[in-house]
């Protein structure tokens, strides 16, 4: 089965990652790490502190980005007497669920379809946040499944114009696909104490099975850090592989650049067909609107070839496909299958 439905990694890990796995000493697992004796969380949080220029005390480590999101939402919606979180209209269903898990409520703010992309209306986000005054505001950049992102300037505008007691949680799981430049993260976290930025090794670094996420938080949140941090340290095997991945930027940047071929193929082969719309994406997936009449035939044809893509069911996106960008031969096969289903339906309609 070729999985192109969960934004995983259909390429090869870096050689440094492979070497770290092969060279890992199993005896290491017989002992806890001792770095917590130095007042540090992990060798990974130390390295991230160096890479991002953020004090180690403000680095968060989690069991994937999912864990950081869940812990943050559970903690802040359970403290302070306000249990409302605002989330984007078209976004990951998991945001809703984790709010409900801790008795929280959510309100959606709009994402707008603009030409060949989706976009936040920054003034509207600011207005909604001030009107609702939620405990948390969640921003996803790039957003899943729409593939659009926020600039550092837009994030700064939002932070400057909303209540200081609203915690802003930015899910940047796919942000490394946008740019190598992450200096803005340190600048924003230093300036705004009510900000959490969540990232992961699952997407750009292609290690979803490692379950290693990381993030950064503004100053003054010792209660949350005590809640989320692990007193006896983290998985030492995962730490070794994570360090190798973080030192493999060149390898993963090359993979990310190669994905542009996939985007262009979708645009040239499907973008001009009646009933189709290929949305611009800066992540490792692409959203495609398609004629819903071909859905059943397309599902069967893909299943027969052992391909799996995401048929969206979200309100407003029911006629869309989300497809993980992968190897050229995989993407070519998916595009050809979509075209065949479309042409067969066109013939039947005659």
Image: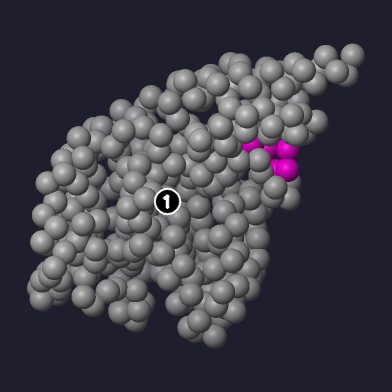
Residue pictured at 67% horizontal, 19% vertical: 339
Q: Toward the viewer: 83 or 310?
A: 310
Magenta portion: prevailing SS class:
loop
Q: Height in image: 297 above or below 44?
A: above
Considering every residue shown, the one lying at the far front of the view is 304
Q: Is residue 24 left or right of residue 269?
A: left
Q: Toward the viewer: 240 or 38?
A: 240
Return the x and y of residue 217 as percentages of the image width and height: 34, 66
Magenta segment includes 39? no
Return the x and y of residue 344 as percentages of the image width and height: 77, 18
Secondary structure under badge 1? Answer: loop
Residue pictured at 20% horizontal, 35% vertical: 15
Examine the image and state in which quarter residue 244 appears: top left
> Does any portion of residue 54 appear in the rendered image?
yes
- Residue span colored magenta: 317-321
State the residue position of label 1.
172
Return the x and y of residue 234 as percentages of the image width and height: 24, 66
Examine the image and state in which quarter residue 29 appears: bottom left
Return the x and y of residue 261 as percentages of the image width and height: 45, 21
Q: How many marks?
A: 1
Considering every residue shown, the one lying at the far bottom of the view is 81
């Amino acid at each position: 089965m070729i999985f192109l439905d969960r934004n995983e990694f259909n390429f090869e890990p870096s050689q440094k990652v492979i070497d770290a796995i092969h060279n890992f000493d199993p005896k290491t697992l017989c002992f806890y790490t001792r770095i917590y004796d130095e007042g540090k969380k992990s060798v990974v949080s130390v390295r991230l502190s160096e890479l991002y220029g953020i004090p180690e005390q403000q680095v968060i480590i989690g069991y994937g980005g999912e864990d950081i999101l869940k812990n943050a939402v559970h903690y802040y919606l359970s403290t302070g007497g306000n249990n409302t979180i605002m989330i984007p209209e078209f976004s990951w269903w998991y945001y809703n669920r984790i709010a409900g898990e801790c008795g929280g409520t959510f309100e959606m703010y709009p994402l707008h379809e603009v030409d060949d992309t989706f976009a936040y209306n920054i003034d509207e986000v600011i207005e909604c946040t001030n009107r609702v005054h939620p405990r948390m505001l969640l921003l996803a950049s790039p957003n899943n499944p729409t593939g659009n992102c926020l600039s550092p300037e837009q994030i700064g505008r939002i932070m400057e114009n909303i209540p200081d007691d609203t915690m802003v949680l930015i899910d940047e799981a796919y942000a490394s696909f946008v740019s190598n430049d992450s200096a803005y993260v340190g600048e924003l976290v230093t300036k705004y104490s009510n900000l959490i930025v969540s990232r992961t090794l699952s997407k750009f670094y292609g290690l979803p099975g490692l379950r290693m996420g990381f993030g950064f938080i503004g100053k003054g949140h010792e209660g949350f850090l005590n809640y989320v941090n692990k007193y006896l340290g983290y998985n030492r095997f995962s730490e070794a592989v994570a360090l190798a991945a973080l030192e493999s930027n060149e390898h993963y940047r090359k993979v990310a650049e190669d994905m542009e071929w996939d985007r262009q193929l979708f645009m040239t082969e499907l973008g001009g067909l009646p009933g189709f719309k290929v949305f611009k994406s800066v992540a490792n997936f692409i959203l495609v609107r398609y004629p819903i009449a071909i859905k059943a035939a397309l599902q069967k044809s893909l299943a027969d070839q052992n391909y799996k893509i995401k048929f969206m069911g979200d309100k407003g996106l029911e006629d869309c496909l989300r497809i993980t960008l992968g190897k050229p031969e995989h993407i070519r096969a998916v595009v050809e299958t979509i075209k065949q289903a479309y042409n067969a339906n066109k013939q039947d309609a005659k």
